Image: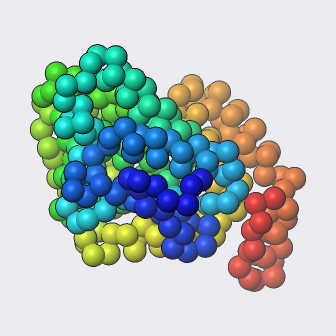
Amino acid sequence: MKDTYETLLTAEPQEYTLLVTLNRPKSGNAMNTQMGHDLLDVFESVNADPSKYRCIVLTGSGERIFCAGGDLKERNGMTDQQWQSQHLLFERGIRALVGCPVPVIAAVNGAAFAGGMEMSLCCDFIYAAEHARFALTEVTLGIMPGAGGTQNLPRAVGSRRAKEILLTGKPFTAAQALEWGMINRICAAETLLAEALETAATIAGNAPISTRQIKQSVNFGMNMDLHSAMMFEIEAYNRMVPTEDRREGVLAYNEKRKANFKGR
């Protein structure tokens, strides 16, 4: 992972936690080609060595916008080939985010439209500021979601609600998103990041092999029949048995102390 990025801020605000901030506030944190390269580098770096971090928090800079989606000013005048080449870069970044073995929390600090909403849906769960708004506006631009929106949204809110959102392109509030099961928590704007980091610290305090295996078991199991998914779960479970962390967890419980997990 690079020390600095042109369109992102990266920080380690607490032990085992990586904070990634979309940092193009003058452009609504919109995704341009450079951000595509930067996000791909961050998540491919974590995926190549997931032991360094135990949780990631993804947010946007500023107080108004998480991510406005693709940068339409940059896209204006692109040839079909240029558009598709850029989108392939975005697809690679989204696959790296979805495939990240480390739990990822989206802290949506404002508007999350189009690709911005899709990015939040690719995270494991979402906390949102009270004033946050969401929309998949691609249908109003003559395109459609291409970063998992037509797949992740129905899994979160059901197909009928998802089709209404997708086909109208209309924005909806954080309160509606919570009611429909798309987000996990609404936070005051001034406490959003702190609450996300508090949850990240809780996750980071648990056994990292366990959290990675749980994430994988849920993600893969959702696409299997129940019998196959339960077999997959047992395979994931058995991965825990010979670990030092499993022995440490049981020992710490019996010694009435906090476990010191090493990821081994």
Residue found farthest to the top? 80
Depth check: give the residue in front, 19 or 170: 19
**Left or right of 94 on screen, residue 30:** left
Depth check: give the residue in front, 250 or 133: 133
Residue 107 at what x, y percent from top left? Answer: 36, 60
**Left or right of 205 on screen, residue 145:** left
Quarter of the rendering containing residue 91: top left
Residue found farthest to the bottom? 256
Q: Residue at x 32, y 75 (%)?
A: 191
Residue 132 at what x, y percent from top left? Answer: 21, 57
Location of the C terminus (image quadrant): bottom right
Q: Residue at x 49, y 32 (%)?
A: 92
The image shows residue 162, relative to residue 116, as above or below, that is above
Residue 159 at what x, y percent from top left? Answer: 29, 29
Residue 205 at what x, y percent from top left? Answer: 63, 70
Depth check: give the residue in front, 217 or 172: 172
Q: Is residue 174 visible?
A: no
Quarter of the rendering containing residue 151: top left
**Left or right of 7 on screen, residue 162:** left
Q: Residue at x 33, y 22 (%)?
A: 82
The image shows residue 250, relative to residue 230, as above or below, that is below
Q: Residue at x 23, y 46 (%)?
A: 68
Quarter of the rendering containing residue 70: top left
